[in-house]
Image: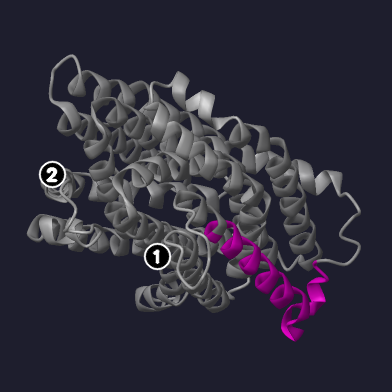
């Protein structure tokens, strides 16, 4: 297989997955934009609430993400029964997790207050989180089905269903945040209802597709779904828990930054949320390429084709580097224009948010290369089902290096939000270097 073939096959998987990741991110961006039009206080509250939801989601999504390399490797071995077993138990574990974490969302207000957040912002965030918490199991099951279908090469349907969810999210937001079309004006709670609506719709559509598509019926995914498969569950648990904890370590870095920015001020927190949304949009391109790398590496690993595996990995890394360089140029060139897209410019606080957010977005350009490389390295390592050591490398990079650096630079050294973001850069660079070293050490 030539390098050109590797590029073509990576793009065939990666472009729909990148598009799906961007569309998934668009769900959060539309919430941010529409709440930015509605008011700064609800925006700040949903920045906290959505980022808190994401932290809990990331931990549980380890089971869903484990399904992708396990299904791809099983296909590489020609073991179709294992495809069904692994996916089912991924769904089982996701549902159980969604039920277990619901109390965290119900009592999120006291938790946010204990973390030093503004009482009014915390009250609105709790109202938001009490609603979205009931969608956790559905959101995780959607991710399992996305992993399953992507590993089978059905990336187009993942993209189209996610785009459909974005349209529904915009419509419900418009109706319920602002009280249009005769609906009640619910503000942040309206955004929560929109979020849970999109999760349920996505789950139903993907589930019907996976069950009824003739080409996939041979897997019998939902036949006797209620029967436990303890061996497959242990395998998904073994691979998925470290993936979830790795995501928690990275997500914790950004959640800690949001909490610390909340200590600085509401305007700064709103600017921080917008700048992170923009940086996350380009990051989703890396996530899509990383998922494509996971699938291709896992298949080659299942076939025992190590030379092809190494070439596929190199091609994926180079493609991710190209995306990172393009992002750097964009962020440095027009930061003010990008931030302004998220705000109602007639509101008096918008000018301050644009000024502060523009500085943060220029800083975001600094960690584009590192952020892309660390997520690509994680995808490659998952492809060879190596998750435990990467979990520890990520935890050290983010919690023992990144968060302390952010705190010290922001507060004792007095650099505020700028110092906080420089600490993010340090943590991401440490993660990228150590994880890439781990992968190439394994595959030689």
Q: Which of marks 2 and 1 is in front?
A: 2
Mark seen at residue 22:
1
Q: Is residue 441 left or right of residue 219?
A: left
Q: Name the spot of residue 191 as percent of width and height, x first.
A: 48, 56
Q: Position of residue 200 (x, y in %)?
A: 65, 63
User: Residue under circle 2?
Assistant: 352
Picture quadrant where residue 161 is located:
bottom right
Residue found 40% across the figure and 78% down from its top? 8
Residue 318, by quadrant, is bottom left
Q: Element under label 1? A: helix
Question: Residue at left 44%, top 52%?
Answer: 187
Q: Nearer the viewer, residue 184 or 320?
A: 184
Q: Colour scheme of this structure image?
A: one colour
Instruction: Indicate whether 51 appears above or below 326.
Output: above
Q: Position of residue 118 (x, y in %)?
A: 37, 27
Question: Is residue 307 at least partly visible in the picture?
Answer: no
In magenta segment, residue 208: yes
Residue 373 lies, with reference to residue 160, above or below; the image says above
**How many neighbours does mark 1 have within 10 angstroms: few (below 14), some (14-19), or many (20 or more)?**
many
Q: In which quarter of the image is the N terminus?
A: bottom left
The magenta stretch is: 194-221
Seen at 35% across and 64% down, the residue is 315
Give yes or no for contact between labels 2 and 1 (Cβ–Cβ under 8 Å).
no
- Tell me how many marks there are: 2
Please say if 63 is above or below 202. above
Residue 74 picture location, percent across and down: 70, 61
| Marks 2/1: CA–CA distance | 28 Å
């Amino acid at each position: 297989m030539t390098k050109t073939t590797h590029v073509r096959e990576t793009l065939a998987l990666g472009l729909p997955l990148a598009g799906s990741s961007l569309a998934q991110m668009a769900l959060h961006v539309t919430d941010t934009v529409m709440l930015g039009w509605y008011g700064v206080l609800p925006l700040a509250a949903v920045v906290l609430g959505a980022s808190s939801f994401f932290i809990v989601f990331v931990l549980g999504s380890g089971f869903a993400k484990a399904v992708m390399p396990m299904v791809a490797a099983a296909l590489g071995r020609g073991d179709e029964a294992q495809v069904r077993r692994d996916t089912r138990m991924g769904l089982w574990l996701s549902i159980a997790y969604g039920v277990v974490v619901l109390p965290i969302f119900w009592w999120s207000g006291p938790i946010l207050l204990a973390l030093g957040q503004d009482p009014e912002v915390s009250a609105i965030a709790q109202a938001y989180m009490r609603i979205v918490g009931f969608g956790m199991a559905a959101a995780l099951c959607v991710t399992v089905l996305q992993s399953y279908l992507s590993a089978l090469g059905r990336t187009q349907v993942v993209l189209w269903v996610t785009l459909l969810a974005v349209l529904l999210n915009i419509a419900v937001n418009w109706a319920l945040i602002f009280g249009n079309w005769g609906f009640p004006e619910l503000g942040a709670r309206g955004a929560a209802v929109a979020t849970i609506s999109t999760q349920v719709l996505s789950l139903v559509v993907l589930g019907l597709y996976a069950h009824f598509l003739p080409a996939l019926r041979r897997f019998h995914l939902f036949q006797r779904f209620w029967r436990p498969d303890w061996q497959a569950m242990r395998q998904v648990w073994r691979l998925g828990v470290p993936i979830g904890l790795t995501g928690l370590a990275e997500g914790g870095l950004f959640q800690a930054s949001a909490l610390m920015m909340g200590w600085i001020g509401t305007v700064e927190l709103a600017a921080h949320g917008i700048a992170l949304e923009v940086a996350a949009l380009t990051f989703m391109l890396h996530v899509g390429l990383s998922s494509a790398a996971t699938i291709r590496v896992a298949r080659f690993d299942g076939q025992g084709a190590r030379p092809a595996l190494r070439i596929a990995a190199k091609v994926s890394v180079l493609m991710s580097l190209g995306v990172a360089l393009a992002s750097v140029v964009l962020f440095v060139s027009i930061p003010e224009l990008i931030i302004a897209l998220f705000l109602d410019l007639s509101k008096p606080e918008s000018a301050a948010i644009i000024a502060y957010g523009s500085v943060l977005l220029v800083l975001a350009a600094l960690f584009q290369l590192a952020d892309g490389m660390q997520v690509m390295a994680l995808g490659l390592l998952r492809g060879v089902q190596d998750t435990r050591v990467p979990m520890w490398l990520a935890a050290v990079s983010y919690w023992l290096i990144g968060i302390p650096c952010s705190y010290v630079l922001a507060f004792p050294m007095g650099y505020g939000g700028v110092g906080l973001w420089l600490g993010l850069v340090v943590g991401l660079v440490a993660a990228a270097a150590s994880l890439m070293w781990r992968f190439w050490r394994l595959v030689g």
